[in-house]
Image: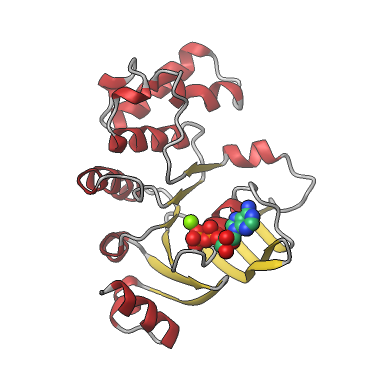
């Protein structure tokens, strides 16, 4: 079966410094791939390239058979097929929770206000925050805001979810509710590529762990294999540093 997402030889430089140095990665439908690696290893850049927020210098990105790295593609349409959540919950502060969630559906998919609101409410129900629909984001905890950001990312019914360090800015006691939501999305069949420092979560939920170092994939494997029997010296050093 062909993968939902295929990355072929992805290269990306900033000001002459190569940050991604030939990344190949296939992600199957319903698979949860967790990217790990030290700060600066290229995780965010890779996710931003997949979502066309960065233009790759070389290689190819194929989503469900479509070459989305072709400069002629409509980037907005591609982005509506890919849900993204970043570290800092970037909800619009002047919009109520429900309007944050439905904005993309209304503008990109030209969904009517009533349809979008109905869909938004169903999404909020799914994440357990239907009672916050009329609130403004600053009335929500950080964990609730990140859950709303996830609901917003799901509003266009994307084929793929990209999650970049979505718990890194949260107080420790708020991390669990966000990771629980990711776990339930996986159970519902979502295809997810996420960068995280939450190794216990990676071990528990990932189908595959991918270790990036210096802009290349050094090692990847099933979580138990990866964490208990790393093959590469660089992986061992990375894991040893985490243990301290
Ligand atoms: N827009 C940018 N301009 C210049 N350098 C960047 C930019 N984005 C990322 N970088 C550099 O690319 C490298 C990889 O960064 P990043 O992808 O954010 O890594 P990670 O998410 O793994 O911490 C870093 O050296 C970072 O400074
Ligand atoms: Mg990052």
Where is residue 128? Give x, y as percent.
25, 30
- In the rendered image, the quadrant that contains the C terminus is bottom left
Residue at horizontal 54 percent and vertical 14 percent from the top: 112
- In the rendered image, the quadrant that contains the N terminus is bottom right
Q: Is residue 174 visible?
A: yes
For ligand 1, give the image quadrant.
bottom right
For residue 90, side relative to residue 47 (left or right): left
Where is residue 206? Give x, y as percent.
35, 62
What kind of colouring is applied to the model shown?
A: secondary structure
Pick the residue in front: 170 or 110. 170
For residue 124, side relative to residue 210 (left or right): left
The quarter of the picture where residue 38 lies is: bottom left
Pick the residue in front: 150 or 41. 41
Residue at horizontal 46 percent and vertical 37 percent from the top: 153
Residue at horizontal 51 percent and vertical 45 percent from the top: 159
Vertical side of 203 occupied by 127: above or below: above
Pick the residue in front: 177 or 197. 197
Vertical side of 82 occupied by 102: above or below: above
For residue 155, side relative to residue 80 (left or right): left
Q: Is residue 46 visible?
A: no
């Amino acid at each position: 079966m062909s993968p939902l997402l295929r990355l072929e030889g992805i290269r990306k430089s900033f000001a002459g410094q190569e940050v991604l140095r030939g990344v190949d990665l296939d992600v199957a439908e319903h698979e949860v791939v967790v990217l790990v690696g030290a700060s600066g290893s290229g995780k965010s850049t890779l996710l931003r390239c997949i979502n066309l927020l960065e233009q790759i210098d070389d290689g190819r990105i194929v989503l469900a058979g479509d070459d989305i790295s072709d400069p002629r593609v409509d980037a907005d349409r591609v982005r509506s097929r890919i849900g993204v959540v970043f570290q800092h919950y970037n909800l619009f502060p002047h919009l109520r929770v429900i309007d944050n969630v439905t904005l993309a559906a209304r503008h990109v998919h030209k969904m009517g206000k009533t349809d979008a609101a109905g869909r938004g409410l169903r999404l909020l129900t799914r994440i357990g925050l239907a009672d916050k629909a009329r609130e403004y984001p600053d009335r929500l905890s950080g964990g609730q805001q990140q859950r709303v950001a996830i609901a917003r990312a799901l509003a266009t019914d994307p084929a793929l979810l990209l999650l970049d360090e979505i718990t890194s800015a949260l107080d420790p006691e708020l991390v669990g509710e966000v990771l629980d939501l990711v776990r339930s999305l996986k159970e519902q069949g979502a295809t997810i590529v996420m960068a995280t420092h939450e190794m216990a979560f990676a071990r528990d939920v990932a189908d595959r762990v991918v270790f990036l170092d210096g802009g290349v994939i050094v090692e990847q494997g099933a979580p138990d294999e990866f964490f208990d029997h790393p093959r590469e010296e660089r992986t061992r050093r990375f894991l040893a540093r985490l243990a301290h």
